[in-house]
């Protein structure tokens, strides 16, 4: 094919992470005739934020993450955001269960393993907060089976490493949900991409960099691509484009020129883990233990001591320690932040800089921390940790959304956001947490935004209800449906159920 020829596809996915893998899989299941191409700049899938070592792999169900349950001024705890995230993860479980029953996922334990989720605090004020949080959450059917203890010996039974060597008079409290999971999103992405490549009409291209994204006169998108290995250029014509390139999505959104993307900016936050691969240590910790975030810290910096099971090997991660890098991707350029500034977003970005001095001060403090200070933070969770058992590992790069408003100011958003063109032919995903855990839920939102005309009884809807049985049901209010689907998915995925 000459450099001037065009390839034609129905759908192009930019980026080969968990988001593109999930959406491409869903679309192919709904309409096997779709011609889908996945384009990835690196030499493999899941090399950025989807990589198993770049994220916490919590299987975010808002069981243990206290940033989802803020305390109101009257002392009560708001669990509304936690309930949203909690039931969004149910969508992921349903998709994975469907793919397992179909045989597309051969063995769930290749990417998901049972792992209790715990919240752990110390100090009387924090203990009182956790009591209130527990009382509110355990009363709701979505948090059935949640346990709480303020007894040192009971907590030590749940997670011995966090209690050994601790002052026996220190007020402590923990909650636990045994039905939690550890998810290796890197492994899952590889499973989904391999499945896609086995299907007719689905292609995955590595070492292919998207250099431009423009609208053709016929309404199709022209995706200009450079083959980094062959040093050739080509243009792909597509009816629909999904920009799921993580930190690289903002640049491509700007290149697309869609009015809906004007004014958006990004603020990068980097992170560092402490990682322990010593079998004698990791064998004694089977939980994801989340603490309270430091004042002024971003949500993805909530400290946690996590069991991780990756490629069959059990390890412990602690962190992440927040930091700052001007890169938008780990494999990106230090000029990413500067090059993302354009006339349309400079005012929102300046407004965010002015209004978030506390966050700036926190990040500066984290960057200036010595390794001694970092290890001292670990010892707050694991008092008898030995320095020689731990090594430093760089976490994934997160780009937080700077969202414009009509007054030309901006707001820093810590969630994810889908930005779709008016004609629904392109959608870009910006943001970070809770990210990978809600990939299936995000895919459902793409369907609603861009393929609503296909979600009918004579088109995709019957098949979609096979994939997501609770489509159209609010699990936050339907306790019976919530209980039933969690039992079904737990049985299929080999998870704990209470």
Image (tube, rainbow, N blue to C red):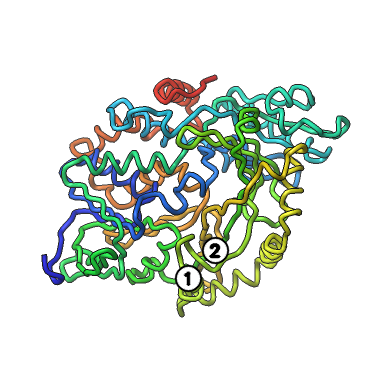
Q: Is residue 439 above or below residue 165?
A: below
Q: Quadrant of the C terminus?
A: top right
Q: Is residue 432 above or below residue 257?
A: above
In the image, which disc is placed on residue 268? 2
On screen, residue 198 versus residue 301, left or right, reads left
For the image, the number of numbered tags is: 2
Residue furthest front in the image: 388
In the image, which disc is placed on residue 336? 1
- Would you identify the image quadrant in which residue 295 lies? bottom right
Q: Quadrant of the N terminus?
A: bottom left
- Would you identify the image quadrant in which residue 290 lies? top right
Task: Tell me if label 2 and label 1 are in contact, CB under 8 Å.
Answer: yes
Residue furthest bottom in the image: 343
Q: Around disc 1, counting alpha carbons within 10 Å, would you say few (fewer than 14), some (14 to 19), or many (20 or more)? A: many
Q: Residue at x 25, y 33 (%)?
A: 463
In front: 422, or 63? Answer: 63
Q: Around disc 2, counting alpha carbons within 10 Å, would you say few (fewer than 14), some (14 to 19), or many (20 or more)? A: many
On screen, residue 296 versus residue 197, left or right, reads right
Q: Secondary structure at mark 2?
A: strand
In the image, which disc is placed on residue 353? none
Q: Secondary structure at mark 1?
A: helix
- Residue 45 location, x and y as percent? 36, 50
In front: 490, or 165? Answer: 165
- Residue 8 location, x and y as percent? 15, 59
- Residue 488 location, x and y as percent? 41, 21
């Amino acid at each position: 094919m000459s450099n001037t020829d065009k390839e034609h596809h129905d759908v192009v996915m930019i980026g080969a992470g968990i988001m593109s893998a999930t959406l491409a899989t869903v679309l192919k299941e709904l309409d096997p005739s779709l011609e889908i191409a996945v384009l990835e700049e690196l030499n493999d899938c899941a090399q950025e934020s989807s990589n198993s070592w770049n994220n916490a792999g919590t299987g975010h169900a808002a069981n243990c993450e206290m940033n989802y349950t803020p305390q109101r001024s009257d002392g009560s705890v708001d669990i509304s955001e936690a309930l949203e995230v909690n039931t969004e993860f149910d969508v992921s479980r349903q998709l994975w269960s469907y793919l397992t029953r179909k045989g597309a996922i051969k063995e769930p334990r290749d990417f998901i393993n049972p792992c209790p989720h715990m919240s752990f605090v110390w100090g009387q004020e924090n203990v009182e907060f956790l009591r209130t949080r527990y009382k509110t959450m355990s009363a709701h059917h979505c948090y059935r089976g949640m346990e709480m203890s303020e007894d040192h010996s009971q907590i030590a039974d749940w997670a011995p490493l966090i209690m050994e060597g601790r002052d026996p008079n220190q007020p402590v409290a923990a909650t636990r949900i045994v039905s939690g999971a550890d998810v290796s999103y890197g492994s899952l992405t590889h499973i989904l991409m391999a499945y896609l490549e086995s299907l007719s009409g689905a292609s995955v291209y590595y070492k292919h960099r998207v250099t431009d994204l423009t609208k053709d006169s016929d309404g199709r998108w022209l995706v200009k691509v450079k083959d980094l290995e062959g040093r050739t250029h080509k243009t792909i014509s597509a009816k629909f484009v999904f920009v799921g390139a993580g930190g690289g999505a903002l640049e491509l959104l700007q290149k697309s020129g869609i009015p809906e993307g004007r004014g958006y900016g990004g603020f990068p936050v980097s992170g560092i883990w402490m990682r322990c691969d010593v079998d004698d240590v990791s064998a004694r910790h089977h939980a994801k233990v989340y603490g309270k975030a430091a004042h002024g810290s971003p949500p993805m910096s909530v400290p946690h001591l996590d069991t991780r099971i990756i490629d069959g090997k059990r390890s412990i991660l602690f962190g992440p320690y927040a930091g700052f890098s001007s890169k938008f991707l780990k494999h990106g350029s230090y000029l990413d932040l500067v090059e993302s500034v354009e006339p349309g977003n400079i005012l929102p970005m300046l407004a965010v800089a002015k209004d978030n001095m506390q966050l700036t001060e926190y990040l500066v403090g984290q960057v200036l921390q010595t390794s001694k200070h970092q290890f001292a933070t670990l010892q707050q969770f694991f008092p008898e940790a030995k320095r020689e058992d731990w090594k430093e590992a760089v976490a994934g790069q997160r780009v937080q959304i700077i969202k414009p408003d009509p007054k030309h100011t901006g707001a820093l958003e810590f969630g994810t956001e889908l930005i779709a063109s008016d004609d629904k032919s392109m959608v870009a995903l910006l943001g970070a947490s809770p990210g990978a855990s809600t990939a299936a839920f995000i895919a459902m939102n793409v369907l609603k935004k861009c393929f609503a005309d296909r979600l009918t009884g004579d088109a995709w809807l019957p098949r979609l209800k096979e994939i997501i049985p609770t489509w159209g049901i609010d699990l936050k209010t339907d306790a019976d449906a919530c209980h039933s689907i969690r039992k079904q998915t737990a049985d299929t995925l080999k998870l704990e159920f209470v």
